[in-house]
Amino acid sequence: MAPTRPQTPRPLRVNSRGAGLRPGRSGAGNPTLPASAMAAGPAPLGGHPRAQKPHLSKMERVVVSMQDPDQGVKMQSQRLLITVIPHAVTGNDVVEWLIQKYCIAEDEALHLGTLLVQHGYLYPLRDPRRLLLRPDETPYRFQTPYFWMSTLWPAAELDYAIYLAKKNIRKQGALVDHEKAHYDQLHRKINHTWDLVVMQAREQLRAAKQRRKGDRLVIACQEQTYWLVNRPPPGVPSVLEQGPERGSCTARQVQMTKTVDFYKREIECCRKALGRTRVKSSVCLEAYLKFSSQRGPHDPLLSGCLPSNPWVTDDDTYWAMNAPSVAVPTKLRVEQWAFSFRELLEDPVGRAHFMDFLQTEFSAENLSFWEACEELRHGGQAQVPALVDAVYQQFLAPGAARWVNIDSRTMERTLEGLGRPHRHVLDDAQLHIYMLMKKDSYPRFLKSDLYKDLLAEAVVPLETKRRVFPFMWKPRHSSPSLALLPTSTSGEPEAAAGSPGGGDGET
Amino acid sequence: MAADGLHENETLASLKSEAESLKGKLEEERAKLHDVELHQVAERVEALGQFVMKTRRTLKGHGNKVLCMDWCKDKRRIVSSSQDGKVIVWDSFTTNKEHAVTMPCTWVMACAYAPSGCAIACGGLDNKCSVYPLTFDKNENMAAKKKSVAMHTNYLSACSFTNSDMQILTASGDGTCALWDVESGQLLQSFHGHGADVLCLDLAPSETGNTFVSGGCDKKAMVWDMRSGQCVQAFETHESDINSVRYYPSGDAFASGSDDATCRLYDLRADREVAIYSKESIIFGASSVDFSLSGRLLFAGYNDYTINVWDVLKGSRVSILFGHENRVSTLRVSPDGTAFCSGSWDHTLRVWA
């Protein structure tokens, strides 16, 4: 539980501010409050010093620019029964402003606006019990910065008790269920200062009666919104939740960063980094273009897949045809073996065919050796000595049954290391053999009849007739608006009339 | 005594400033070979067509926030973990739950599927990473065969099996990463260098398979040599915590997602940041990122409940996906790239395609 604040009676700052009716901008125009009144110091014990998350200050900047007299959202006076409230905005205008300002579609603008309301930066003047943004004429106002999440956090128990007491006094039965529960709980917990709570509540209510009806209404909305954010009703997710604290223990951070070792390591890392060979950006970036264009047709989410994407059509033939050890691989799969040696080896079918090829060249022991080294590197610690020995006997010992041809220097170093076997003792030898296969055997494999036959025999699946249109066609005229059809609650694909996939002739 | 203290402070201050100046020099060096921007190079690439991705499966069953998920190599099973300690294995194609275990701790922030498909690993506020063999024997209690593998001094934020079921790589709130032997629980290598909690890691898809990248609350992304435990490269351009790191499919680059509401691409050969994926209207942090199979698309889940799809080459946002009702906490593309799965604080997981 958040600790209660120091026991100075909560000053009537909410009312005396009178700032309720002016746009909630801190600074010019608002009456300054006595310093003692601004007891809004953040980060009490247990609260996290990292409270000011980046998204809060960004939201605040948005809200401030929304209130700009020239570029901001259109302000108007709002009539509520007989009272007129100035400086209100409609939900519609808020959404429009966001669309214009950020060049986004309506759905995104509505979503962003809703987040602003959910975080208490905007409050509805009518029905202030639900923090929603309605894209219509519903009136909203900007929350006074005093009540911003970054200013007044965490909410104090004492203040909540006073708020609930006020509600209770003002109208019997005004508290809803979860508020009643909180009220009772607080009553028990801070029973010793309950008189203070009631006194404060009465005092604030009395002062409120002195105010004009419009001010009173606005201040009540502001307060209500603040508490909706900080004490959300059940079923409403709390926007305050942050998850387990991160790097919050300042002591721990100090310990981690301010040691001599830490800086020495950083210096070492920097020195090494300064010495490394870098490649020109143009070369590196060109490589992405080449990689992506080569792989594009192999990317199901980008280009679709044949016969169909199982997730879209509920037909898992695609998986059956691409099973790890399928008898006849697909054309795309066989083509992929030519992209890189690594990808050939990663595919069990590819690797098996490569092994067959090596056998025709009497160098299959290279691949077997490589596989054995992999097993060592990724195997259990306990197996290391036995595996190293087995590899030595089979591949490295003089006169070994499947002797691998490693250059003498590497062989010497390896044999030396075998005296103290560890999982990386064969790394050098493994790399040597790997490069040998990659530079020598692999290119020959790709030119071989074996491979050419595999390509020729490979399957190209037929596209399955589907309920929904295929996924992606030729590029369309790009538009910022992306209408997303609603999904049914079961998550099943909609049998859409105006097809989502496109390619039905629309431009 | 006082003299020693002073000496150490001086050394500390001078070390700190030396580190700072070296970092400055490093940035200068990195800038020298930066002769073109990615979006310029990508001008001649064809623009992507209109994107429509939909939720194809919704997995309901967690009673609390979903924090992490991982795919099985069979391309359809997944493991997911949540705040209330539940870890569930699903066949997401049929949406059937196949296994469930309740951890003795809350906030299970990390989970991983073993390459064989026969075990899962998970951990969180218990500061440990435990491995559970998966069994279909109705009589067997999954929790009975649990093996405690990793021990950290703070929460476990991420874990991943290496190429086999026998080794696990972990990242922790204690600021370190570590490599463990599953069978014995032995610590094989530890990785020190982050100045704050480590939040994420990803293994490199390289030929030699010896490096991985980690991201942390110190805003740094660090690339490590698994064999020596040394930091090989470090990048510090984010403005806030790095929640997620993922390698580009070629292994020559990696992407990161951060609380500063941006995703960034770092090239390992150029040794620098080469792209920033951001938009003024995107205000909330990116919690998890992953590439499509060709590396052309970057999927990123955000704390504002949405998923943004980025064109990696052109740097533009191609799609925004709505559906989740609370923050997206985890996102992974399936092993064969036919779909991606997102997990959220709204207690559900969604498979999109």
Image (cartoon, coloured by chain):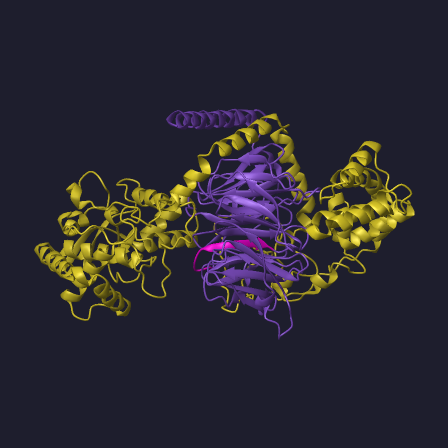
Chain colours: A yellow, B purple
**Is residue A307 found inside the magenta-colored segment of the image?**
no
**Is residue B332 found inside the magenta-colored segment of the image?**
yes
What residue is drawn where x is 22% and y is 46%?
A: A23
What residue is drawn where x is 20% and y is 44%?
A: A38
Of the 4 image quadrants, the one containing the N terminus of chain A is: bottom left
- Left or right of A279 on screen, residue B61: left
Above or below B152: residue A469: below
Q: Position of residue A78 (x, y in %)?
A: 21, 55
Q: Nearer the viewer, residue A263 or A381?
A: A381
Q: Position of residue A79 (x, y in %)?
A: 19, 57
Q: Position of residue B265 (x, y in %)?
A: 55, 40
Q: Nearer the viewer, residue A261 or A12?
A: A261
Q: Position of residue B16 (x, y in %)?
A: 46, 28
Instruction: State the predominant SS element of the stretch in magenta.
Output: strand
Q: Which residues are magenta?
A: B324-333
Q: Residue furthest front?
A: B1
